[in-house]
Amino acid sequence: MPETSRSAAFRDEITEAFDLDPDHARIVDEAARILDELALMESAIAQHGAIVQGRYGPQINPALEQADKHRKTFMALLKSLNLPRETHAEIVDMTEAAAAKARSDAARKAALARWGTRG
């Protein structure tokens, strides 16, 4: 899977700021991989919307639940690094902003699909 700019920025920020031991470096690599997977899910949500056609009719896009699980996993990995609070807060702000944008885009697309140009 190709690395996204968000995961590359995350990896660069952490590795430039801290001298990581091999175990912590593996955690950073795993967290970056989670960010890459999360980018794929956010793209799918933006493309298909929050509501998709399922086997038995409309349903919530499964990528929403998986994206939420990935965010929680990312936060757990980040917490396990035991970074200074100010660095941790900057990274959380970066990932939360991206998540909020993806949710907003998905909600907008779902509303347009549901209501079209009717106001």
Image: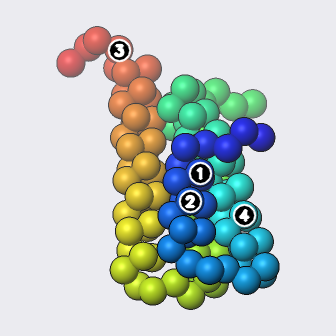
Secondary structure at numbered mark 4 = helix
Q: Mark 3 or mark 4, which is nearer to you?
A: 4
Mark 3: amino acid: Gly
Residue at the (41%, 85%) spot, across then down? 85
Which quadrant holds residue 62?
A: top right
Residue where numbered disc 4 is placed:
29
Residue at the (26%, 14%) spot, across then down? 118
Quarter of the image for the C terminus: give it.
top left
Looking at the image, tell me whether mark 4 or mark 1 is earlier in sequence order: 1
* Structural distance between the alpha carbons of marks 4 and 1: 10 Å
* Image marks 1 and 3: residues in contact by CB distance under 8 Å: no
Q: Tell me: residue 15, above or below residue 23.
A: above
Residue where numbered disc 2 is placed:
12
Mark 1: amino acid: Ala
Mark 2: amino acid: Asp
Residue at the (69%, 31%) spot, across then down? 54
* Structural distance between the alpha carbons of marks 3 and 4: 42 Å
* Image marks 2 and 4: residues in contact by CB distance under 8 Å: no
Residue 25 x %, y %: 72, 73
